[in-house]
Image (tube, helix red, strand yellow):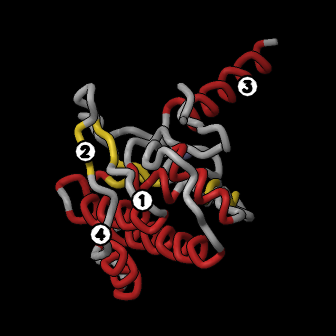
Amino acid sequence: MANSDGIGDSGFRFGNGRLCFTFTATLGDRGAPVPLERLAVPGDLARWCVEAGLLDETPPAGAAALAGARRLREAIDRAAERVRTGASPGPQDAEILNDWAARPALAPQLDATGGLGWRQEGAQVRHVLALVARDAVDVLTGPMRSRLRRCAGPDCDGLFVDVSRPGNRRWCSMNTCGNRVKKAAYRQRHAQSG
Ligand SMILES: [Zn+2]
């Protein structure tokens, strides 16, 4: 599970507040010359499903699942970028999203404490990816589509939905990129004064 910084045990980012964008954040440092691939091997994808709180047990995952997951992830990122800049998603990306969104997905469940849980019997990576795709379709067509942003953190470029009232949020997560920038500014101030 993610710690209070919004960073999971395996270094996954979970602090940006939206399932489909925690998934696109599995490719980190998108603004860097070489982005950080957090889904390097199929086991990473399986761990993400568990650390995201969607599956209780690590599901089987192979090379084909990983390739499909990355394809969906980048289709979401490109489609969101188009919507963010006022355009429509490209037809190929829309097809990838729509295909996944039409497949059987994890079902939401009320848990014993009244919180949100997920139906677990027989749940596989593909049910998780279908849920991620549905979340992406929901964001990209919903009332918050005008609030899509990319993080201003150095190299991050992670997607998030700005739910702040003034609409001036700059970081994918205050606990990760926001803090990094604040600490860097603090160090710089003290270096100048000292
Ligand atoms: Zn960020």
Amino acid beneath label 3 = Gln
Residue 59 is left or right of residue 55, and the answer is right
The residue carrying pointer 3 sits among few (fewer than 14), some (14 to 19) or many (20 or more) residues within 10 Å by Cα, namely few
User: Mark 2 falls on what kind of element?
Assistant: strand
Q: Residue at x 65, y 38 (%)?
A: 9
Evaluate whether residue 157 shows in this view.
no
Give the residue at the far bottom of this rendering. 92
Quarter containing the C terminus = top right
The x and y percentages for residue 69 are 53, 70
Label of residue 86 in the image? 4
Question: Disc 2 vs disc 4: which is toward the camera?
Answer: 2
Amino acid beneath label 4 = Gly
Label of residue 109 in the image? 2
Query: Circle 1 sits on which residue?
Result: 123
Q: Nearer the viewer, residue 6 or 189?
A: 6
Q: Residue at x 24, y 61 (%)?
A: 138
Q: Earlier in the sequence, mark 3 or mark 2?
A: 2
Question: Does ligand 1 reach within 8 Å of label 1's beta carbon?
Answer: no
